Image (tube, rainbow, N blue to C red):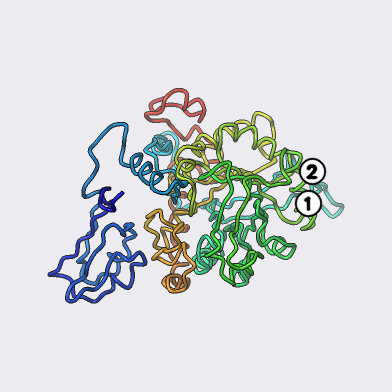
Amino acid sequence: MNPGSVPAKFKVRIDADQCMLCERCVENCPYGTYRREGEHISVDSRRCVACHRCVAMCPRDSITIEEKPVDYRSHPLWTRESREAIYNQARTGRIVLAGMGNASDLPIIFDRLLLDACQVTNPSIDPLREPMELRTYIGKKPRKLDLRKKRNGDIELKTRLHPNLRLNTPIMIGHMSYGAISLNAQLSMARAVASEGTFMGTGEGGLHPALREFQDNMIVQVASGRFGVDIDYLERGAAIEIKIGQGAKPGIGGHLPGEKIDPDISQTRMIPERSDAISPAPHHDIYSIEDLKQLVHSLKEATEWKKPVFVKIAAVHNVAAIASGIARSSADAVVIDGFRGGTGAAPRVFRDHVGIPIEAAIAAVDQKLRSQGIRNEVSIIASGGIRDAAEVTKAIALGADAIYIGTAALIAMGCRVCGTCYRGLCPWGIATQNSSLTRRLNPDVEWQHVANLIRGWTLEISELMGAAGINSIESLRGNRDRLRGYLLDEAMMNILDVQPVGA
């Protein structure tokens, strides 16, 4: 198959009248799209992934990138994506990899849910004048409180409380490991969550020594590969998360290529240098809820029952029943990752065709736990392509206690969602271990961008709650009466347990 036999995805043009031959595009493109030839810049558009680094660095705005300059002949069944996947596999005979979350043109349920607002008879609340409570506690809650009055009149709490995480906002940053992303990216996010009084996950790549100053705001992860896991690692985290599944690739494990395992990552993950870090699909000691319960208890015993333990699963068809089992396993929170959850690399066929939307999963799990009277036994953390404060608010109204963001935090640091994280050449210094590229991300600058994003969303959540006449995140949780379905079918509204607009 000749290189020119397939239409290029992008066409890069340089305005010769504007270009000053500074060569910043040549220096900044790690994919080799540009090169200097005499008195002009030569362009190979087929190398372009539309990361926009060259556009951002060009001092004269002389670069334009056009998507699909020559498309395939249109056909309702044989789309460009389906044909290119076939060409790719016909050439390589391999599984096609893709980055980020589900890219199929499927309806986004959040876009078809509308929030309520007060008018006339039910007054709204002004967050600028009245206190709004967004503090969120993640972990088991007691069914009731036993109190005892002392002889001196003081009240003593007799109920034993389970360890909870206290968040100033219901927004956390999900797990992205050192190896999948750069240390500078992790440092930026760690400093941001510490600043905003919330938490982030380490991923399954261990905890780098440079992150230890933020360990009180870190959730350590135990995944099927058990990379970087020892008692020191477990004790440093504010909470522990067992990763069973991931929304972008339910049912399969992960693979970090050996070329990314440099001495620093090798030491953090506790694996040999340049060896592939392969996470098996299942945990080889977990084949039932009883097995999971044993691991939860082991982690709690190892940390003297001082840290909450979460269990992360992918959103799949029977997610409610699985979450019910997790709630009975002594876990303190269940993390549900929807099919739009991001990833550095996943087989395209999994990313786009396996799993269910996070909206349906939250509602199904919340209803199941309520119907069984065990909703207080476990918190629900939702993740998977959450894009703004409105979606955070809708997720909580559907039943979540808090949410994880991932891609949104990366975008705050400059990510352009070009979807080629698995190539290790991220020009923004995020999804790469190339030192010449990681230097481009300055943690002293980018942490502020991530913190601003979390703070801005938190302010917007307060405004949305105030407009709905709610002054506490506890009152919003599972309050589906504040949601209405628009252009959703009856079956989906029954799953979400929401009324249609106008009702």
| Pair 1/2: label in front | 1
Residue ID at (37%, 57%): 416
Q: What element carries label 2?
A: loop
Label 1 Cα crowd, 10 Å radius (few <14 / some 14-19 / many 20+):
few
Query: Does the rendering let one see residue 324?
Result: yes
Percent of width and height locating residue 29: 33, 67
> Is residue 238 placed above or below 360 in the rendered structure?
below
Percent of width and height locating residue 2: 28, 51
Which residue position holds label 1? Answer: 298
Q: Where the C terminus falls, by quadrant?
A: top left
Residue ID at (44%, 62%): 452
Spatial CA distance of label 1 from label 2 is 29 Å
Q: Residue furthest top?
A: 490
Which amino acid type corresponds to the residue marked 2 in the rendered image?
Answer: Asp
Q: Nearer the viewer, residue 306 or 355?
A: 355
Query: Does the rendering let one see residue 385?
Result: no
> Is residue 182 placed above or below 92 in the rendered structure?
below
